[in-house]
Amino acid sequence: MTLQEKLKEYQRDQKAILATNFYNLETLQSVLTAAESCRLPVILQLTRSSIEYMGLRESVALARQSLEDYGVKGWIHLDHGDSVELVQECLDAGFDSVMIDASNKPFSKNVEITRQVVETAQKYNANVEAELGYIAKPGQEQTGEFTTADEASEFVEQTGVDALAIAVGSAHGFYKSAPNLNIERIAEIHKATDAILVLHGSSGIPDPMIQSAIKNGITKINLATEIKDTFMKALKNTLLTTDEIDLRKVFPKACKPVADLLIHKFKIVNFS
């Protein structure tokens, strides 16, 4: 089953797929341990920085083999692709899905770039995600520049994009103030377009708010910051209490807290 088909299935059932970033072997294993435990599919996400750290073909091969080893249904996705060139490299490397993020450009330019990626990805039968509106980046302030239903409808119609990350009050990284999703806006956009709606910046958003977003049209939930934060806190605590120098013994101790976090997240987005 393609990712497009699975997302449409979840959209019809008012459910959401958890899309998790991974950064090394241990975070990947933590994700798949949780997915296996919950018997749920997962989208494995890589950003440019993770690709540059681990290597493009190396990270894809690691993810593919690990999905097979754990018996988990999953797809590999480029998160926040910042250029058409990077998207092309990822498609050639076997990604199932790519995101082109031209949200910092004017609407017409965002449409132009996204449409180009959609046309290219069709040759690979790959899912394409774009972003529309202002979703604050780490260290930036949130603003009220939310995606509108009319903009979303027009953008999807002009680009043919499969999935759309929308600005409805979430932010990347840690929140400086309590997050407050505009659930009404999510419902309006969902009514205006049948594209898959994506929530970026789910780390730190209260569970009931996440579930309300899903009930009103969100089908893909991105999680990254809490994974990194949980892994590093657990690793630091371990290093403070051991003189062990073998990283093969130290790094795995940070896996269980991450897996526990993700089991909770899987259950939150797959509520009934």
Image (spheres, rainbow, N blue to C red):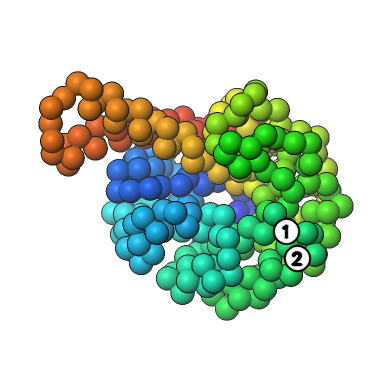
Contact (Cβ within 8 Å) of mark 1 with mark 2 = yes
**Mark 2 Cα-neighbour bin, 10 Å: few <14, some 14–19, many ≥20:** few
Give the percent coordinates (x, y) of residue 5.
59, 60
Q: Residue at x 53, y 54 (%)?
A: 79
Question: What numbered label is drawn on residue 105?
Answer: 1
Q: Residue at x 38, y 48 (%)?
A: 23
Give the percent coordinates (x, y) of residue 36.
37, 43
Q: Amino acid at mark 1?
A: Lys
Residue 170 lies left or right of residue 80; in this view the side is: right
In the current view of this chain or complex, which residue is farthest to the right? 150
Q: Amino acid at mark 2?
A: Lys
In the rendered image, which quarter is residue 183 located in?
Answer: top right
Whether residue 32 is situated above or below residue 161 in the rendered picture:
above
Q: Is residue 270 visible?
A: no
Return the residue nearer the eye: 139 or 236: 139
Residue 92 lies left or right of residue 141; in this view the side is: left
**Mark 1 Cα-neighbour bin, 10 Å: few <14, some 14–19, many ≥20:** few
Question: What numbered label is drawn on residue 109?
Answer: 2
Give the percent coordinates (x, y) of residue 125.
56, 72
Q: Secondary structure at mark 1?
A: loop
